[in-house]
Image (cartoon, rainbow, N blue to C red):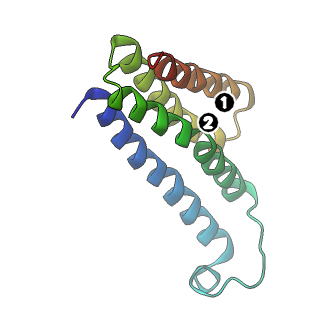
């Protein structure tokens, strides 16, 4: 398995961490009965649960682009130092993004998002 595919696999694990963090927070906010029920009553996430919901949604907005870029690099045999660095930058920036969003850190969180996009663009640029 190439390094880029390993980072892709780890990004899936990270996506599950984002999802589980949100699921845990929303269950704590609304209770086990709500979590195990039909959820007919809409209870929007607030506070920590709301921030984790937005962080998870943000991850899912960028992850498909990252995944496709990694797969293109692999399928076209364009692996390079740039694609590896891009994967590493994307993954570690996304690791940092979750707690920054959860704790409501405004400017640094946005800067880390930009860094993750630089990593994604590095991976994609390796295709060309």
Rendered image quadrant of residue 28: bottom right
Is residue 12 toward the left or the right of residue 28 in the image?
Answer: left
- Image coordinates for residue 91, horizontal then vertical, percent: 45, 31
Residue lying furthest top: 81
Confirm or deny contact between disc 2 and disc 1 (CB under 8 A).
yes
Q: Circle 2 — which element?
A: helix
Q: Position of residue 80 (x, y in %)?
A: 33, 14
Residue at mark 2 to residue at mark 1: CA–CA distance: 5 Å
Q: Which mark is residue 9?
A: none
The image shows residue 69 at horizontal and vertical percentages of 47, 31
Q: Is residue 68 above or below residue 49?
A: above
Vertical arrangement, residue 41 with respect to residue 72, above or below: below
Q: Which residue is mark 1?
A: 109
Foreground: 21 or 84?
84
Residue, x 42% and y 31% (percent of image)?
A: 72
Which residue is located at x 44 percent, y 16 percent? 126
Which residue is identified by label 2? 100
Q: Nearer the viewer, residue 121 or 42?
A: 121
Q: Specify which label sits upstream in the sequence, 2 or 1.
A: 2
Q: Position of residue 35 (x, y in %)?
A: 60, 79
User: What crowding class fits label 1: few (fewer than 14 Cα within 10 Å), some (14-19), or many (20 or more)?
Assistant: many
Q: Quadrant of residue 38?
A: bottom right
Q: Residue at x 59, y 38 (%)?
A: 62
Q: Is residue 7 above or below residue 85?
A: below
């Amino acid at each position: 398995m190439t390094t880029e595919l390993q980072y892709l696999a780890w990004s899936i694990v990270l996506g599950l961490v984002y999802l589980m963090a949100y699921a845990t927070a929303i269950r704590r906010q609304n209770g086990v009965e709500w979590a195990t029920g039909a959820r007919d009553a809409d209870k929007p996430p607030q506070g920590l649960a709301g921030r984790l919901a937005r962080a998870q949604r943000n991850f899912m907005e960028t992850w498909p682009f990252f995944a496709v870029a990694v797969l293109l690099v692999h399928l076209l045999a364009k692996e390079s130092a740039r694609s590896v660095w891009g994967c590493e930058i994307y993954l570690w920036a996304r690791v940092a993004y979750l707690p920054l969003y959860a704790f409501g850190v405004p400017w640094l969180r946005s800067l880390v998002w930009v860094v993750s996009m630089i990593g994604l663009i590095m991976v994609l640029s390796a295709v060309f």
